[in-house]
Image: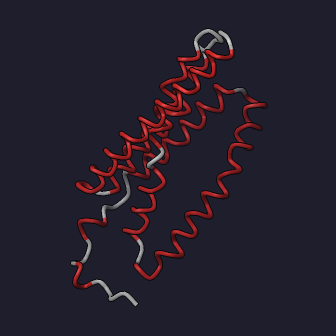
Amino acid sequence: MGDASWAEMVALFLLMQTLSRTVSSFLSGLLADRYGNRLVLRILSVFLAFLPLSAAVLGRYTAADRPWIWMPVYLMVGLLIPLMPISHNYLLEITPMKRHASCIGIANGLMIASAFTPLLIGFLISLFGHTRVFLGLSILMLGGIYFSFRLGEPRFKAEPADQLPPLP
């Protein structure tokens, strides 16, 4: 496969990821508006656990002449892009209004700190190989799925809008 073919394949991957993000954002918004952010967090948690698992499985079948095998991974990455805004929305639902700014600041700080996670994962891959690390990540993320099912749904317990404190 020549360089032009790889460039076209990468463009196709990014196009599919963008389309996946568009559909996921739309559906996540609809589900969150109707059933609450908690449900969307649960659904996206499952996809998040499948992402490294799919990469580990598909990695066994890749070859220079079959780069399209990675398409499901790119589709799942697109599906997961709305996870951060949904998480922020849920965080705003469960925290008191006067703590919103600090809680979002802490959440964003943790996201910045998580930028170093790929370095750790890369180091672990160099020690144990892709398959073991990706399977370990999927197993670790099962804990996230478990905890997402223990989250409460504050939306349906919220006070009526007329009882919220006035804006300063």
Specify whether 106 is left or right of 162. Answer: right
Specify whether 135 is left or right of 167. Answer: right
Where residue 124 appears, x then y in whole percent?
74, 36
Where residue 101 appears, x then y in whole percent?
50, 75
Placement of 153 over or under 103, stated as above or below = above
Report which quarter residue 64 is drawn in.
top right
> 98 or 94, which is in the foreground?
98
Where residue 134 appears, x then y in whole percent?
61, 32
| Residue for point 28% across, 49% down | 31
Say how many tags the image has. Answer: 0
| Residue for point 48% across, 48% down | 144
Where's the N terminus, which quadrant? top right
Q: How is colour applied across the structure in the image?
A: secondary structure
Where residue 35 appears, x then y in whole percent?
25, 54
| Residue for point 59% across, 25% down | 10
Specify whether 164 is left or right of 18. Answer: left
Where's the C terminus, which quadrant? bottom left
Placement of 29 over or under 48, stated as above or below = below
> 43 or 11, which is in the foreground?
11
| Residue for point 45% across, 50% down | 83
Placement of 58 over or under 160, stated as above or below = above
Specify whether 86 is left or right of 113. Answer: left
